[in-house]
Image (tube, grey):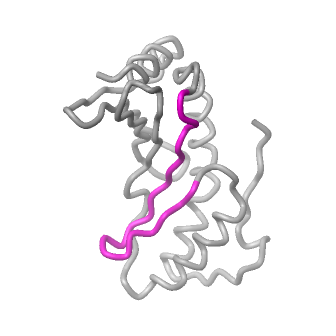
Amino acid sequence: MFHATYEIANAFDDEDISYHTEHNENNSRVIAGISGDYCRYSIQFISSDDDNDVSIRVFDLAKFPAEMLVPVLRTVNDINCKYKYVKFCVDREDRSISAQYDMPVRTDDPGKSAKMLFHVFIQIIDDVFPVLMRVIWGNAYTGNDDDLNITFHES
């Protein structure tokens, strides 16, 4: 297990955050399952070396039918303009939406950073998920900021 994974697991233990770890020769992960306000998902903290670099991913946050690709792309683009650090990505082949963030390389305290970002991810996904679902279910998004209904939180 890589150093950052160990540090994140210890930090999550201190906060009583439920998680499990996985590791192989290429990377190690801390995976925390979340039951948010609107959906269930897993936040993965992935490390691939001992330099304390960590990638945070939420894979398959939402799936959408092929005919909704263009509205989903437009909405994800608008959402990405609202958030500075978390990036939402569309996989055209899998027709899914994921969220990602890459922590700065060589973070001195990856555990502390991961705890903070864990809570930020939950809040952002709770804000964004209903917007994505409205678009996927066919309720038109007009591009108006009021349609996003996103609340910004100080971190």
| Placement of 44 over or under 40, stated as above or below | above
Quarter of the view holding residue 23: top left
Quarter of the view holding residue 108: top right
Direction left: furthest residue:
25
> x and y percent of residue 81 in the render?
70, 65
Looking at the image, which is closer to me, 63 or 27? Answer: 27
47 sits left or right of 17 in the view: left
Total number of numbered discs in the rendering: 0
Residue at 57% from the left image edge and 57% from the top image edge: 87
Residue at 45% from the left image edge and 83% from the top image edge: 68
Query: Magenta stretch?
Result: 87-106
Q: Is residue 49 magenta?
A: no
> x and y percent of residue 20 in the render?
32, 26
Residue at 34% from the left image edge and 32% from the top image edge: 29
Q: Which quadrant holds the C terminus?
A: top right
Residue at 38% from the left image edge and 33% from the top image edge: 47
Q: Is residue 105 magenta?
A: yes
